[in-house]
Image (cartoon, helix red, strand yellow):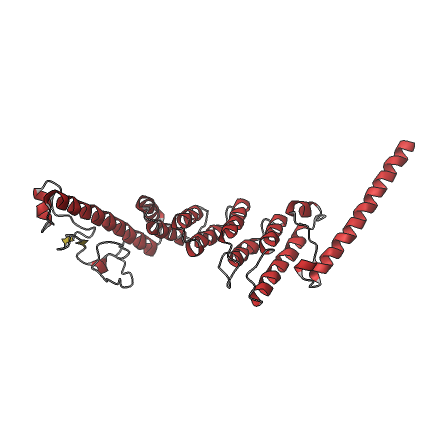
Amino acid sequence: MRTSRRITLAFSVLLIGCMIGSVVFLRRLDRVRSGATLEEVLYISSPQALKRMSLGYDGLLADIYWTRAVQYFGSKLHQRDRRFELLAPLLEITTTLDPHLLVAYEYGANFMSPKPPDGAGMPRQAIELEEFGIRNNPDQWRLYYNEGFIYYMDLKDYNGAANAFARGSQVPKAHPFLKILAGQMAEHAGDLQMARAIWSTTYQTTQDKDVRANAAAHLRAIKVDEDVTALEALVARYREQTGLLPLSFSDLEKAGMLRGTPLDPLGNPYKLMFDGRVEVLSPDDLPFIEKGTPPGYVAPPPKLLPAE
């Protein structure tokens, strides 16, 4: 009987402690909701500890912290303050409490990534936030899309952008434009092999005729860029060996460096210029090329040929 009383007493004390803790915790939440500044609110900095103490109200608490994150960012932006020390902790708490709160990843990263005065200037933390979102929501292609643009816009990291877009393009029901973006980023990064693989996959798998034509145009552009690079390297080697620039591609043929007149992907012969540069016959018909254009050439809007 005494043992039973001790157990009852222990559980009663524990229950009273939980009730007191709940009251204190809810009063803290009331202070957050009442509009007190975040610096005045003693919030728990450990997301995991806060999740354990949420008494099952993870979603409600996540919404409250997300609201405070928005208010915090907005007030700092309005004050033109360049310090956003609490933004990352608030977003970490929010997404730990509710890992499926997609709005916190999408808008939270947009708050963090841009440089002041438009944002917090924390692109690396923004990418960490998106990666946390991807781990918890792997089928949400927009998270990969957002991450790719952070790499592209704020870090100028084309390889990182290409990787993010390529990963996103593999997600079921992902927008087909992700494959296009992945290929474009790979071209910017100079990774032509990766770009070719992405555009080839896009060309072979898409059912959209416009996307297919776009992929075909990029594949032709990659071929031109590789051809021009290789031909100009031959011209440089010829000059090293003879001390002269070749007058035509036939000079390279006679030197055993080339077999036949090189043709671009449209079947037109490349042009060897007097200064050793190589140009395409009609650059307007080959959108997206980076090489083989006349000096000062400005490309018109892409005119895509039908995909074969």
Q: Nearer the viewer, residue 141 or 164?
A: 164
Relative to 78, is 183 on the left or the right? Answer: left
- At 12% from the left and 47% from the top, the residue drawn is 261
Residue 290 drawn at (x, y percent): 27, 54
**Residue 137 visible:** no
Residue with the most extreme bottom position: 78
Residue with the most extreme front position: 243
Residue 96 drawn at (x, y percent): 61, 48
Relative to 173, is 271 on the left or the right? Answer: left
Looking at the image, residue 80 lies above or below residue 128? below
Quadrant that contains the N terminus: top right
Looking at the image, residue 82 lies above or below residue 22? below
Relative to 116, is 280 on the left or the right? Answer: left
Residue 139 drawn at (x, y percent): 50, 47
Residue 210 drawn at (x, y percent): 33, 56
**How many discs mark residues in the rendered view?**
0
Residue with the most extreme right position: 1
Q: Nearer the viewer, residue 115 or 179?
A: 115
Relative to 1, is 109 on the left or the right? Answer: left
**Residue 233 visible:** yes
